[in-house]
């Protein structure tokens, strides 16, 4: 990783390989590749590390000329195939002038290069093809080049996958959740190495974003109007908006019915009086969300389905809509263990977008930790605890759970799924959800 030698000048014309910033960036790529456990990093020359980054960070301009070194020739073939691929056309829209995303994609490109090196070392036919392809005068060079190109394109397809869907999902996230969260979504998706896992993640995110969009629209059309209608009466004021006519004081309402000329005069002179409303304050919410393995299945058949909304997707959408609509929210996630309390909205949404299924369920411990939080921070007593779970826990201690719940101003338990749970014994504050859609989400928000 020291000073560049002649062989360390790469295949890009628009990169200064001796520049200090270039050396810093190639070192960042090296360290990230090491964390991702890319094998045989010692075989990678500095220019390969630098090229892998700048191919993504800016529009690449390739040097012309032949490569006498076989490994350098292989790198040029990989880069040429990649920058002419559909995957690169989509990826480059995300990575241009974005150092973090450029490093992530650089590591994927390095994985392709190392994989090709290993194949060539194990396969004499491929090794001979590389030598032939490097020798432009060889009659078999064209066939050899075609063989290597097929291998390279296969690896690009495997490691890069369908980037069209990725780009669409990231753009949706940016539009719905804002640029900062969209950036987190981009990192999350691009950092997933194998395409089948990334495809599953993209499908889950698309289901989540669709649910958030539908619920937000229904929230704005329904709950907001209800809150305006049900605001707390605080006094009398002059009517200054037409839609306040529903709040006319009894005297003015009587004029409208029995003395229409007087009513019309008072309306024209702006002297009608109405009851003044004060908006109802949204409750502060302490969220406790189950992220155990069973929460990643659907309600009806307890399997993962690409086209269906999973329990955790619905729970995540509920939490995100609350955060987006101005509720003051803190949150803990749990499975067999309890995770740290989050008070930053961006951290809550970021975590919701990157949840992975782990282990079983320990609801009692989750409520006990919430109770401990209240004892350490009495301000949390003013929060309403909302527990979201499928209730699949055979070791519930209802006495301890009741004690923990009673330490908050109020509580709601949202049970997702058909399974019977001992939590149902806690009474009317328990809501069971069978259909994971925007309508059920809004119904729960009304109760919260």
Image: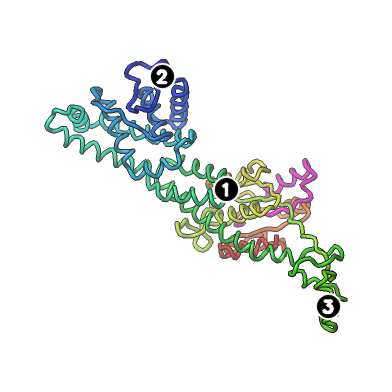
The chosen color scheme is rainbow
User: Mark 2 to mark 3: distance in Å?
Assistant: 84 Å
Q: Residue 246 vs residue 141: left or right?
A: right
Q: Among all residues in the image, which is located at the extreme left? A: 139
Say which residue label 1 marks. Answer: 178
User: Mark 1 to mark 3: distance in Å?
Assistant: 49 Å
Q: Is residue 206 magenta?
A: no
Q: Is residue 386 magenta?
A: yes
**Residue 18 - label:** 2
Query: Nearer the N terminus, badge 2 or badge 1?
Result: 2
Q: Quadrant of the N terminus?
A: top left
Image location of residue 317, percent across then percent down: 58, 55
Q: Identify the element where label 2 is drawn.
A: loop
Instruction: Tell me if label 2 and label 3 are in contact, CB under 8 Å.
Output: no
Image location of residue 264, percent across then percent down: 81, 77
Question: Disc 2 vs disc 3: which is toward the camera?
Answer: 3
Instruction: Tell me if label 2 and label 1 are in contact, CB under 8 Å.
Output: no
Say which residue label 3 marks. Answer: 263
Q: Among all residues in the image, which is located at the extreme bottom? A: 258
Q: Identify the element where label 3 is drawn.
A: helix
Image location of residue 368, percent across then percent down: 71, 47
Q: Is residue 116 above or below residue 432?
A: above
Are there few (<14), some (14-19), or many (20+) residues within 10 Å of tag 2? few
Residue drawn at x 83%, y 67% as measured from the top left = 275
Query: Nearer the N terminus, badge 2 or badge 3?
Result: 2
Q: Which residues are magenta?
A: 364-390
Quarter of the rendering containing residue 88: top left
Residue drawn at x 66%, y 53% as measured from the top left = 396
């Amino acid at each position: 990783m020291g000073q560049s030698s002649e062989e360390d000048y790469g295949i890009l014309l628009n990169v200064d390989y001796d520049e200090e910033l270039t050396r810093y960036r190639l070192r960042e790529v090296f360290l990230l590749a090491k964390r991702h456990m890319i094998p045989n990093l010692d075989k990678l020359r500095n220019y390969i590390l630098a090229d892998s980054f700048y191919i993504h960070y800016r529009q690449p301009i390739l040097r012309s000329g032949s490569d006498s070194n076989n490994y350098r020739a292989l790198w040029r073939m990989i880069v040429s195939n990649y920058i002419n691929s559909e995957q690169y056309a989509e990826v480059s829209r995300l990575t241009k002038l974005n150092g973090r995303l450029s490093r992530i994609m650089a590591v994927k490109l390095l994985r392709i290069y190392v994989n090709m090196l290993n194949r060539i070392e194990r396969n004499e036919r491929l090794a001979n093809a590389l030598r032939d392809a490097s020798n432009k005068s060889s009659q078999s060079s064209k066939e050899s080049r075609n063989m290597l190109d097929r291998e390279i394109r296969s690896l690009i397809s495997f490691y890069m996958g369908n980037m069209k869907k990725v780009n669409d999902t990231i753009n949706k996230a940016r539009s719905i959740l804002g640029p900062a969260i969209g950036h987190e979504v981009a990192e999350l998706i691009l950092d997933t190495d194998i395409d089948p896992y990334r495809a599953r993640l993209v499908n889950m995110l698309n289901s989540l974003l669709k649910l958030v969009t539908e619920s937000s629209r229904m929230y704005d059309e329904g709950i907001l109007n209800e809150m305006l209608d049900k605001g707390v009466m605080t006094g009398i004021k002059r009517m200054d908006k037409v839609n306040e006519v529903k709040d006319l004081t009894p005297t003015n309402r009587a004029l409208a019915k029995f003395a229409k000329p007087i009513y019309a005069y008072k309306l024209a002179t702006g002297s009608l009086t109405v009851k003044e409303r004060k908006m109802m304050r949204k409750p502060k919410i302490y969220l406790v969300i189950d992220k155990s393995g069973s929460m990643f299945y659907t309600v009806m058949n307890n399997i993962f389905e690409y086209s269906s909304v999973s329990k955790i997707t619905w729970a995540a959408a509920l939490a995100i809509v609350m955060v987006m609509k101005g509720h003051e929210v803190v949150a803990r996630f749990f499975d067999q263990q309890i995770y740290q309390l989050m008070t930053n909205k961006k951290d809550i949404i970021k975590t919701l977008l990157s949840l992975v299924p782990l282990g079983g369920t320990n609801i009692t411990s989750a409520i006990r930790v919430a109770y401990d939080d209240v004892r350490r921070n009495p301000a949390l007593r003013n929060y309403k605890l909302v527990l979201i779970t499928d209730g699949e826990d055979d070791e519930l201690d209802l006495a301890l759970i009741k004690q923990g719940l009673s330490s908050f101003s109020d509580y709601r338990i949202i049970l997702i799924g058909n399974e019977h749970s001992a939590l149902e014994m806690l009474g009317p504050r328990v809501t069971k959800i069978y259909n994971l859609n925007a309508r059920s989400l809004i119904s729960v928000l009304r109760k919260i």
